[in-house]
Image (tube, rainbow, N blue to C red):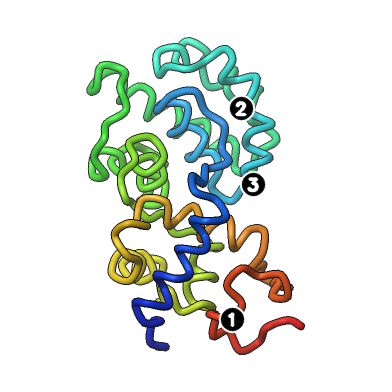
């Protein structure tokens, strides 16, 4: 496994990310913690744009677990059937909504363990909610972050969990809160999987990726 970049290089990389986008935002549309949780759960193996298109009408009507239960599974499916795996996702949303109503007074819990105990909510989903809603320095590693972490050697790792730990270990504390958003956006729009846009990359001179495009 490749060694991570040194502290000063990583600090400079995130200094540049911060200068370019001081307050990076997640791209999933939501109105509160509950709709964020639902949006992230629906986004597994789907694009943020596709989820947003499906949930705009849904969240205009439904923004609490109780309202979701009243809508019903068939009503939810009518809104999200353009999203992959929609039937299974609908079942999980209904189950987690019932748990939130019965066990949490309709509120979304703010602990990773409680979130991960909800149907259809894994560590990545929990970390997104913890970061985007409560502002905690939780690192949700998706395919973009996994790729960027390894290519740049900011956070090399053979597994998602290893990359998550590497971000926590290697990224300076002052950049932890927004680290995963900067890395996701960099992977989505610049450090793309098939043809990274190295010529216009903000950190080209600091990146050790050997297969840079010209």
How far apart are labels 1 and 2 at the CA level?
40 Å
Q: Residues within 10 Å of mark 2 (few under 14, many from 20)?
A: many
- Report the residue at 40% width, 28% height from top: 33
Q: Nearer the viewer, residue 90 or 3?
A: 3
Q: Nearer the viewer, mark 1 or mark 2?
A: 1
Q: Distance between the Cα atoms at labels 3 and 1?
A: 30 Å
On the rendered structure, is 14 left or right of 75?
Answer: left
Residue ID for mark 2: 55
Residue at 45% across, 56% down: 180
The residue located at (40%, 19%) in the rendering is: 65
Circle nearer the N terminus (3, 1): 3
Q: x, y (%) of residue 162?
A: 35, 71
Between 185 and 117, which is closer to the camera in this rendering?
Answer: 185
Compared with residue 133, is residue 176 higher up or lower down, i.e. above or below? Answer: below
Residue 84 location, x and y as percent? 64, 43
Determine which residue is flagged by label 3.
Answer: 47
Which is more foreground, mark 3 or mark 1?
1
Q: Secondary structure at mark 1?
A: helix
At numbered mark 3, what does the secondary structure look like: helix, strand or loop?
loop
Estimate the x, y position of residue 135 in percent, counting from the top left: 34, 40
Quarter holding the C terminus? bottom right
Label 2 secondary element: helix
Please tell me whether residue 56 is drawn above or below residue 110 in the rendered image.
Answer: above
Q: Position of residue 71 (x, y in %)?
A: 52, 13
**Mark 2 or mark 3: which comes first in sequence?**
3
Q: Are marks 2 and 3 in contact (CB under 8 Å)?
A: no
Question: Which quarter shows the N terminus?
Answer: bottom left
12 sits to left or right of 208: left
Real-space Cα separation, disc 2 to disc 3, in angstroms = 12 Å
Rendered image quadrant of residue 3: bottom left
Say which residue label 1 marks: 205
Q: Mark 1: few, some, or many residues within 10 Å (few <14, many ≥20)?
A: few
């Amino acid at each position: 496994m490749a060694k991570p970049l040194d502290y000063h290089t990583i600090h400079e990389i995130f200094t540049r990310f911060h200068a370019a986008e001081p307050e990076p935002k997640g791209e999933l549309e939501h109105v509160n913690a509950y709709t964020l949780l639902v949006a992230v759960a629906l986004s597994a193996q789907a694009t943020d744009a596709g989820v947003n298109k499906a949930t705009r009408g849904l969240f205009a009507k439904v923004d609490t677990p109780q309202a979701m239960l009243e809508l019903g599974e068939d009503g939810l499916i009518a809104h999200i059937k353009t999203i992959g795996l929609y039937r299974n996702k609908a079942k999980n949303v209904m189950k987690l909504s019932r748990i939130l109503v019965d066990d949490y007074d309709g509120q979304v819990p703010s602990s990773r363990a409680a979130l991960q105990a909800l149907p259809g909510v894994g560590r990545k989903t929990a970390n997104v909610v913890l970061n985007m809603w409560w502002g905690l320095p939780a690192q949700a590693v998706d395919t973009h972050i996994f790729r960027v972490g390894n290519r740049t050697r900011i956070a090399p790792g053979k597994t998602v969990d290893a990359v998550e730990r590497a971000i926590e270990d290697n990224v300076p504390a002052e950049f932890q809160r927004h680290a995963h958003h900067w890395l996701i956006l960099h992977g989505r729009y610049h450090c793309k999987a098939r043809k990274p846009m190295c010529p216009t990359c903000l950190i080209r001179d600091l990146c050790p990726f050997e297969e840079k495009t010209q």
